Amino acid sequence: MTAALVGRRITVVLGIAIVLVLVVGAIRLAAAWAADAAPLTIAPASATQLAADLAAERARADAVTRQLEELDARSQDLAAALGQARDRVAADAANAAKLKDRLATAKSRLATLEAQLARARVALGSTARAPASAAAAGRSGGERESEGEHGD
C-alpha cells in the first residue's frame, strides 16, 4: 500500500469520527433546547394516584351502566304502554263505528216516529172539526192507535 492510500484512509476515518462527534453534539444541543422549552414543573402521577383514578373511573363506568339499564327498562315500559295505547285507540275506533251505526239507526227510528206523530196530529186535527159525537169516538180510537204506535 502506498502512502497516499494510507493517508486517504486515515483522512476518511478522521472525517467520519468528526461527523459522529458533531451529530452527538447536535443531538445533545437539541435535547437541551427541548428541555428548556418544556420543563417538567409538574411531577408525574404516582402509581397510587393512578390506581385511585382507575378505581374512580370504574365506579363511574358502573354507574353509567346502571343508568343505561334503568333507561332500557323504562324504554321497554314505554314501549309496552305505547302498544296498549295503540290497542286502546283501535278498540275506541271500533266502538265509535258501532256507536255511529247505532246513531244512524236511532235517527232513522226518530224520523219514523216523527212522521207517525205528524200523521197522528193530522188525524186528531180532522176529528176536531167533525161533530162532537164523532170527535169523542175518534179521540178514543186515536189514542188507541197512538198507544199502539208507541208500543212498537
Image (tube, rainbow, N blue to C red):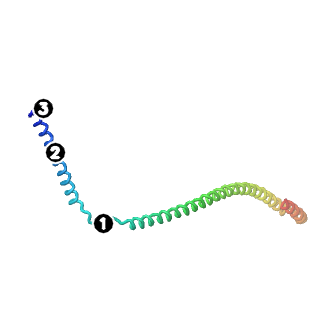
Task: Indicate the secondary structure of the residue bearing disc 1.
Answer: loop
Q: Amino acid at mark 2?
A: Ala
- Quadrant assignment, res 101: bottom right
Looking at the picture, how far across and down is residue 61, in whole percent?
48, 62
| Numbered circle sitting on residue 1 | 3
Seen in the image, is 64 located left or right of residue 141?
left
Looking at the picture, how far across and down is residue 70, in whole percent?
55, 63
Q: CA distance from mark 2 to mark 3?
A: 23 Å
* Mark closer to the observer (2, 3): 3
Q: Are marks 2 and 3 in contact (CB under 8 Å)?
A: no
Q: CA distance from mark 1 to mark 2?
A: 39 Å
* Mark closer to the observer (3, 1): 3
Looking at the picture, how far across and down is residue 85, in whole percent?
63, 59
Q: Amino acid at mark 1?
A: Ala
Q: Earlier in the sequence, mark 1 or mark 2?
A: 2
Q: Pick whichever, 45 or 92, lies toward us.
A: 45
For disc 2, the marked residue is: 17
Q: Pick whichever, 80 or 41, lies toward us.
A: 41
For disc 1, the marked residue is: 43
Seen in the image, is 58 located left or right of residue 43?
right
Q: Amino acid at mark 3?
A: Met
Q: Earlier in the sequence, mark 2 or mark 3?
A: 3
Q: Residue at x 69, y 56 (%)?
A: 91
Task: Indicate the secondary structure of the residue bearing disc 3.
Answer: loop
Task: Indicate the secondary structure of the residue bearing disc 2.
Answer: helix
Q: Residue furthest front?
A: 1
Q: Pick whichever, 117 or 31, lies toward us.
A: 31
